[in-house]
Amino acid sequence: MNNVTHPRTTRPARPTGRVPMRQASAAGHGAVVESTTNKHENILLRREIGEVLRSVRQHQGRTLREVSSQARVSLGYLSEVERGQKEASSELLASICQALDAPLSAVLREVSDRIALAEGVAVPDTVPEELIRQQGLTLR
């Protein structure tokens, strides 16, 4: 892609290089750490989901064949999902997570954290104190 036009439209392409972003007042949930325009343009949800699923499967020492059989999805399709070449439907994703004995919420949280990191957004390891105060929550 050149810097003159976007490949499928006549609008100008985005310039390369750093673009200043508004910094959050305090480093907390959603605080911008560092960002570049092109850095997160290429983030693909299907690729991130696939990488997380593959990582979980390999960590368990399981084969594509085992998981595809248990999830009732073809071996080739599961392979394409893991490589980020196919977009998994919510039903298929739930089936794969069930076959991996991994909560869908945990997989999606990991995907979200990976995307936030790629975007340069700080993700806290704990619940922000401000949220606790707003909700009137107590710890322990």
Image: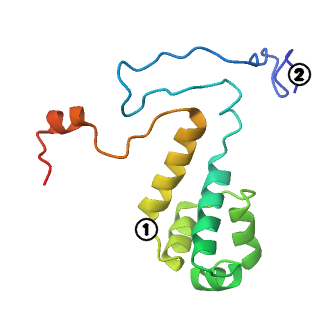
Residue 85 rendering spot, x and y as whole percentages: 75, 57
Question: Which residue appears at 60% of the width and 25% of the height?
Answer: 35
For badge 1, the amino acid type reads Pro
Callout 2 secondary element: loop
The N terminus lies in which quarter of the figure? Answer: top right
Q: Quadrant of residue 14?
A: top right
Q: Residues within 10 Å of mark 1 (few under 14, many from 20)?
A: few
Which of the labelled discs sits on residue 81, or is there none?
A: none
Which residue does the image show at 67% across and 45% down from the upper left?
44
Residue at 42% x, 60% y is 105
* Cα distance between the residues tagged 1 and 2: 42 Å
In this image, 64 relative to 125: left or right? right
Mark 2 lies on residue: 2
The number of numbered discs placed on residues in the rendered structure image is 2
| Mark linked to residue 103 | 1
Res 66 → quadrant: bottom right
Residue 121 locus on image (x, y percent): 50, 33
Left/right of residue 126 with respect to residue 44 in the rendered view: left
Left or right: 33, with 62 as reference point: left
In this orientation, which residue lies closer to the viewer: 127 or 84?
Answer: 127
User: Picture coordinates of residue 18 (x, y %)?
Assistant: 67, 18
